[in-house]
Amino acid sequence: MHTLSQALVGLDWAILFYFILLNSFYALLLLLSFPELWTHFQLADDKYLARVLSTDSLPPISVLVPAFNEEVSIASSVLSFLTLEYPRHEVVLVNDGSTDRTMEALVRHFDLYEAPPAFPRIIPCANIRAVYRSRTHSKLLVIDKENGGKADALNAAINAARFPYVISCDADTLIEPDALLRLARPFLLGRDIAAIGGTIRVVNACTVEFGRVVEARVDKRWLAGCQTVEYLRAFLFGRLGWNRIGGNLIISGAFGLFARQYLLAIGGYQTGNVTEDMDLAVRLHIYLREHKIKAVMPFIPDPVAWTEVPASLTTLHRQRERWHRGLIGTVWERRGMLFNPRYGAVGMVALPFFAFGEMLAPIVEVVGYLGLILGLFFGVVDRSFALVFLAVAIGYGILLSLWAIVLEEVTFRRYNVRSDLWRLLFYAVIEGFGYRQLTVYYRLHAFWKVFRGERGWGAMHREGFSGPAA
């Protein structure tokens, strides 16, 4: 019994130390984000954007949009892509074998006609059934192909893209009109760009008209509200802090820019990977380091795209399990990079953090809760230790969420209704009690699916931009 008590005490202290290290690293990212955020905030005014728009230094961009069963929102999304404020861009939409009426909606809304395919298939992809042009929008190219998954659809779009830089977007994403101009700022600094990440915000409950978010609101429903806080924390200081370290490992698949030449060099997206965005970013880092190319992959906080987040527990379960399954697969496949100085900050800091601070976190957290409960039951830990444990494990995260809301309020301040601020503060607190534990369970489920060798995405049910949440 004495040995068991010592083991429980040791386990609880070890996991407490783990949470202190993990949350302190998040706090470090927060501190590193301050100078980055200030720099970008100073450059985000309309006068600067007007100068950017008038310059001839901006490269043309191809917007790549994979779509599968997006009938509900496809017209609004494509319209938002076509009307972006940018000197020269095109939209390449790939209908990836949709089983609903996505293709019919595209033909009807944009007056499509079939055209001969006039591009080489440099990266292998599933069979292309037809290529369409629009009579009403010359910037639009639509590819109808057999289903091969999101990565395969993006590879088909890369083949068809005419311009040197491409932006990958989800079909349910609404990009703000000036987002491309803001995203293109690094091009004016004379640096070689491999990729640029932008901010994703939650569109649920926002007012959308003609493919544009005209009023940003916070959803009254707790599930979408907690995700709104989560996205603010992840993008506003999480990824921004990595700029200073040089280890951005995720360029969001919902809104990210890439140099087409580097995508072709690494063979495009890897099919069969359920988190193709992280896998692509890691492979880009590998290619750049191994070929001694000093191209950068920064994150820019003010170009904003809006996406719909799961409004049901079932859909959230599928999404978070898939995300974590992809993280496990990427870390395992690239395990040779761990603590390898050959790969710089990515190998020495970023990938180890994602392996031990993100991938293993749900296992450690569950073991920590169980150890704490058993320690209290057998009387080997006291209530003071339990309160400290919960304060570090949950309270520290709540504090970081509150800081993310403060940063949002003093910088970009997209939510102008006072009640929305109070909702954000409320969700930041309750996120740690219930929502966090749900996502821990969903991520644990990913380990079981990896063990069973499952690779499917699962159905992602959406309400659409005109549904109940809007």
Image: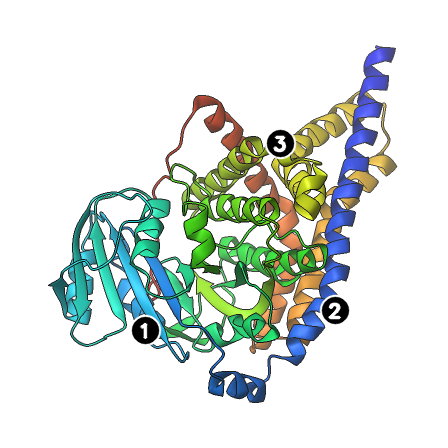
Where is residue 437? Give x, y as percent.
Answer: 60, 40
Q: How many marks?
A: 3
**Mark 1 or 3: the one toward you:** 3
Q: Rounded to the nearest whole Å, what is the CA distance between mark 3 and mark 2?
A: 33 Å
Image spot of residue 4 (x, y percent):
81, 14
Q: Is residue 310 visible?
A: no
Type of amino acid under label 2: Pro
- In this view, which residue lies farthest toward the front? 291
Residue 167's disc number = none
For badge 1, the amino acid type reads Leu
Residue drawn at point x = 50 percent, y = 35 percent: 325
> Residue beneath label 3, please?
336
Residue for point 65% across, 76% down: 41
Label 1, on which residue? 82
- Of residue 469 and residue 281, the one placed in the foreground of this image is 281
Report the front residue among 195 and 169: 195
Q: Is residue 407 above or below residue 223?
A: below
Residue nearer the viewer, 341 or 106: 341
* Residue 251 spot, x, y in % from top left: 53, 55
**Residue at mark 2:** 35
Q: Element type at marker 2?
A: helix
Q: CA distance from mark 2 to mark 1?
A: 34 Å
Q: Nearer the viewer, residue 4 or 360?
A: 360
- Could you tell me which residue is drawn at 29 percent across and 60 percent down? 93
Badge 3 local density, few (<14 within 10 Å), some, or many (20+)?
Answer: few
Please report contact status of discs 2 and 1: CB closer than 8 Å, yes or no.
no
> Quadrant location of residue 33?
bottom right
